Image (tube, rainbow, N blue to C red):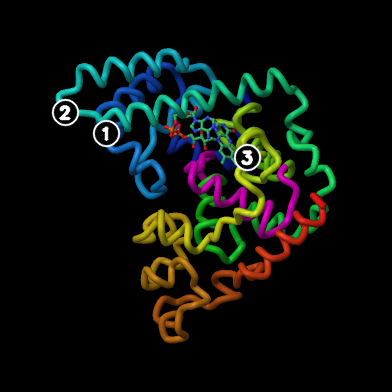
Amino acid sequence: MALLPKTPDWAAGLRAEWHPGEEKAQDYLGAFLNDTLEGYATLRDRPAGVSTSRLSPYLRFGHLSPRQVWHATKRAVQTASHEISLADQDKFLSELGWRDFAWSLLFDRPDLASTNFRPEFDAMRWLDEPDMFTAWARGQTGYPLVDAGMRQLWITGWMHNRVRMVVASFLTKHLLIDWRKGARWFDDTLVDADPASNVMNWQWVAGSGVDAAPYFRVMNPVLQSEKFDPDGEYIKKFVPELRHLPVRALHAPWQASPAELTRAGVRLGETYPCPVVEHRFARERALAAWKASTG
Ligand SMILES: Cc1cc2nc3c(=O)[nH]c(=O)nc-3n(C[C@H](O)[C@H](O)[C@H](O)COP(=O)(O)OP(=O)(O)OC[C@H]3O[C@@H](n4cnc5c(N)ncnc54)[C@H](O)[C@@H]3O)c2cc1C
């Protein structure tokens, strides 16, 4: 269809990462069932390495159907030479369930891409700060986990689920920017961009959605980073300018000592940004905005 980009060719990272088509999709499904399903329930929140199926683009474009994945999973559990726990199987199958739930929700409420599921959010006073949005989209917020996620998205067209939650929370709560802007960016950049899953999940994180995470639960990007990328492997891969910092400082470079920064070749504000907003301030501002809008 002559749609591949040429000048500039920005798709090299996508080509390296993804091999479209049914045959490859089946290979990846097989590899996931053999190697990654065991332990999925406990490891799926780790963004470094392969901890999930990465089947979302294939499901999105119909290279695989959810039914095929469901039945292949059931078969693999019965025939596996090693034991796959019920927890691993159930957790994975329930994720497929979320996908279908998102579609049934959109069927019921076709306006969900533009409208808050919970109308009390209509009064929310979102900020209009294009510079902040650009810092977020380009992975230049000064919070390494957020930046790693946004750069993974830009380079590969995909982002790990845990990090999607962190970056979405950061945009809607730390930066107080409307979830619809974030959803549009994801829609433009994700290889698995799905009209139903994308909107349901953005609204879920923002707090405006069905069965949503409460707005007052503001994810702390440093604690999330320490918990889910404890060795900083994910950060080092996508934010390589920080890779020589000690692990502790990788999660919050502004807490590193001047000597640690010098040794690692990091100059905050030059080679890597200072945080665009301070966590405690941002949290309180978000809570105040939420209280003001919900009365
Ligand atoms: C803000 C935000 C936006 C998102 N946008 C999309 C999107 O546009 N398209 C998309 O497919 N997923 C989206 N998700 C859900 C989830 O992040 C991806 O489905 C998942 O990361 C894909 O990786 P995987 O195939 O390795 O998932 P696995 O963990 O292996 O899960 C298997 C399959 O289950 C489905 N699934 C898993 N988690 C979810 C979920 N939370 N909601 C709906 N379906 C799920 C996917 O089809 C996935 O391929 C979004 C999540 C968030 C927090």
Residue placed farthest to the front in the image?
A: 295
Q: CA distance from mark 1 to mark 2?
A: 9 Å
Q: Quadrant of residue 216?
A: bottom right
> Magenta region: which residues?
155-179
The answer to whether marks 1 and 2 mark residues whose Cβ atoms lie closer than 8 Å is yes
User: Is 113 left or right of 254, judged from the image as shown?
Assistant: right
Residue situated in front as seen by the camera: 22 or 115: 115
The answer to whether marks 3 and 1 mark residues whose Cβ atoms lie closer than 8 Å is no
Q: CA distance from mark 3 to mark 1?
A: 29 Å
Residue 6 screen position, x and y as percent:
61, 37
Q: Quadrant of residue 89?
A: top left
Quadrant position of the N terminus in the picture: top right
Q: Which residue is mark 2?
A: 82
- 167 drawn magenta: yes
Q: Which residue is mark 1?
A: 38
Residue 6 visible to the viewer = no
The amino acid type, in three-letter code, at marker 2 is His
Residue depicted at x 37% and y 68% = 247
Residue 214 screen position, x and y as percent:
63, 47
Residue depicted at x 36% and y 40% = 51
Label whose residue precedes the other's in the sequence (3 or 1): 1
The amino acid type, in three-letter code, at marker 3 is Ala
Q: Is residue 162 above or below residue 71?
A: below
Residue 274 visible to the viewer = yes
The amino acid type, in three-letter code, at marker 1 is Glu
- 104 drawn magenta: no
Q: Secondary structure at mark 3?
A: loop
Q: Which residue is mark 3?
A: 212
Label whose residue precedes the other's in the sequence (2 or 3): 2
Q: Secondary structure at mark 1?
A: loop
User: Is 88 left or right of 286, judged from the image as shown?
Assistant: left
Residue 294 screen position, x and y as percent:
79, 49
